[in-house]
Image (tube, rainbow, N blue to C red):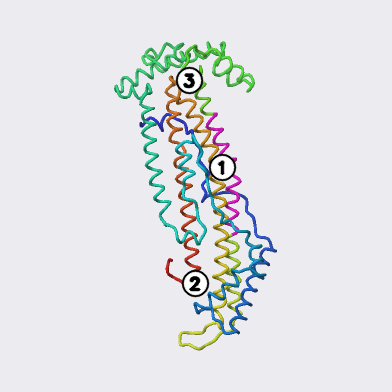
């Protein structure tokens, strides 16, 4: 139905995008910078010792033996783990519960982001395939929402033509006290501009107890509120438009409050996650910058050898680049670990709000009589959240693909294994 977006306020939230998070900056401490530099120097010293013993990082067999030092524990490993944090490779599992809605099941069923080694072995398109299934489910839900909207008075009037829609709006307008006091829509349409202005002034004066618009403007805020309360009382009608006896105005206010409430809840739930996302990005970028600084400085310390027609080379540059590639892997893997943790927190923050939407939908959907306004609201709630689920799925896929690239680069540069498997 083309009415849906035109007539219904947004009953779902605009989430903070995982990839566009905002939050205060968190600088890496001088101690962390010092520890990182010492760790890199320690790795470089170890490689110098191994090279003196006849090992070479450019030989595949040697590089596999050397990397055991970095992966098997010892002082270097303990210091690296302390610097970059503990492992977060535990499974991310969202258990489906009885009675949960389809959209919650779709959110919980997203293929979760993977750590580098697992990501390289996984299907790189698994999240794209899942997104196609979500879109199909969304279209089915949209069709269900359209069926509800088509039962509204506005939709039925639209099917009968423009005259029926016009007549319906005139009937609704004539029910408003101010319009009725001015003579109704038909009579107003026959008045001149001056006559309509005079009729409006008289109707307003009648509703406000005799106050003119000019007098209202001169009142204090408290006086204006008192007049507004008086007008609200005079405009109340006995007609009920839903089973819970809400007037159209009450329903509009109710829906507006719900929208504000849901937006506030999502903002409050996601803001801490958003802050941590930004800090994680900043921490990663700062560590990579420090790694580059160390690499450049270490390269400059190496002796320059002129033994080729193509120019000079730095003696021992392979050791420096090996240390760079190893540390780049651990820094990047730690970012993926944190991304996974934050993605899980992001999904957990969305679940309670989707559950509230489900409760709202279930409460009003089962009622026999709903106003057009509530039908549109329920229809909107049925479709709400799917874009957010698609975004969570997209981010999960992005993290996994980034992790796979990190693992591939490590395998190729450090282990000398450049095939995908």
Quadrant, the C terminus: bottom left
Quadrant, the N terminus: top left
Q: Position of residue 353 (x, y in %)?
A: 54, 37
Vertical relation: 327 (above or below) 355: below
Q: Residue at x 50, y 79 (%)?
A: 59
Q: Say which mark, if any, is on residue 248.
A: 3
| Mark whose residue sits in front, 3 or 1 | 1
Vertical relation: 230 (above or below) 31: above
Q: Where is residue 227 in the image (x, y as percent from the top left)?
A: 59, 16
Indicate the quadrant where residue 233 lies. top right
Q: Say which mark, if any, is on residue 413.
A: 2
Q: The residue tagged with tag 2: helix, strand or loop?
A: helix
Q: Which residue is drawn at 50% across and 41% down?
A: 96
Closer to the chain start, of discs 3 and 1, is 3
Decide: few, some or many residues near mark 2? Use Cα within 10 Å; few <14, some 14-19, many ≥20.
Answer: some
Magenta segment: 257-283
Question: Which residue carries the number 1 mark?
Answer: 349
Q: Dominant secondary structure of the magenta stretch?
A: helix
């Amino acid at each position: 139905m083309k009415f849906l977006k035109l007539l219904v306020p947004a009953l779902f939230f605009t989430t903070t995008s995982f990839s566009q998070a905002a939050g205060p900056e968190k600088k890496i401490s001088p101690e962390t910078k010092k520890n990182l530099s010492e760790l890199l120097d320690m790795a470089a010293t170890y490689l110098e010792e191994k090279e003196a013993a006849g090992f070479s990082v450019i030989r595949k067999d040697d590089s596999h033996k050397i990397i055991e030092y970095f992966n098997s524990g010892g002082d270097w490993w303990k210091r690296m783990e302390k610097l970059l944090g503990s492992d977060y490779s535990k499974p991310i599992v969202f258990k489906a519960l009885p009675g949960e809605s389809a959209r919650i099941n779709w959110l919980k069923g997203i293929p979760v982001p993977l750590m580098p080694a697992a990501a390289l072995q996984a299907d790189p398109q698994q999240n794209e395939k899942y997104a196609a299934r979500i879109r199909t489910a969304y279209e089915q839900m949209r069709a269900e929402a359209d069926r509800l909207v088509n039962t509204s008075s506005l939709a039925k009037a639209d099917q009968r033509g423009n005259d029926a829609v016009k007549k319906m709006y005139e009937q609704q307008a004539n029910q408003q006290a101010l319009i009725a006091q001015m003579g109704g829509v038909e009579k107003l349409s026959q008045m001149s501009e001056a006559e309509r202005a005079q009729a409006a002034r008289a109707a307003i004066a009648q509703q406000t107890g005799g106050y003119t618009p000019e007098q209202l403007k001169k009142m204090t805020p408290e006086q204006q509120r008192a007049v507004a309360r008086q007008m609200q009382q005079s405009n109340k009608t006995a007609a009920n438009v839903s089973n819970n006896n809400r007037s159209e105005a009450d329903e509009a206010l109710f829906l507006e409050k719900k929208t504000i409430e849901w937006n506030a809840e999502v903002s409050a739930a996601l803001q801490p996650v958003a802050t941590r996302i930004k800090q994680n990005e900043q921490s990663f970028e700062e560590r990579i910058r420090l790694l580059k600084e160390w690499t450049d400085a270490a390269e400059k310390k190496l002796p320059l050898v002129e033994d080729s027609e193509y120019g000079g080379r730095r003696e021992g540059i392979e050791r420096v680049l090996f240390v760079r590639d190893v540390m780049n892997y651990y820094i990047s893997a730690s970012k993926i670990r944190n991304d996974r943790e934050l993605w899980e927190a992001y999904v957990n923050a969305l679940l309670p709000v989707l559950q509230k939407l489900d409760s709202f939908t279930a409460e009003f959907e089962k009622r026999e009589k709903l106003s057009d306004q509530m039908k549109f609201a329920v229809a909107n709630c049925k479709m709400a959240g799917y874009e957010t689920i698609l975004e969570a799925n997209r981010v999960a896929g992005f993290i996994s693909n980034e992790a796979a690239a990190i693992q591939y680069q490590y395998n190729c540069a450090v282990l000398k294994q450049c095939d995908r498997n």
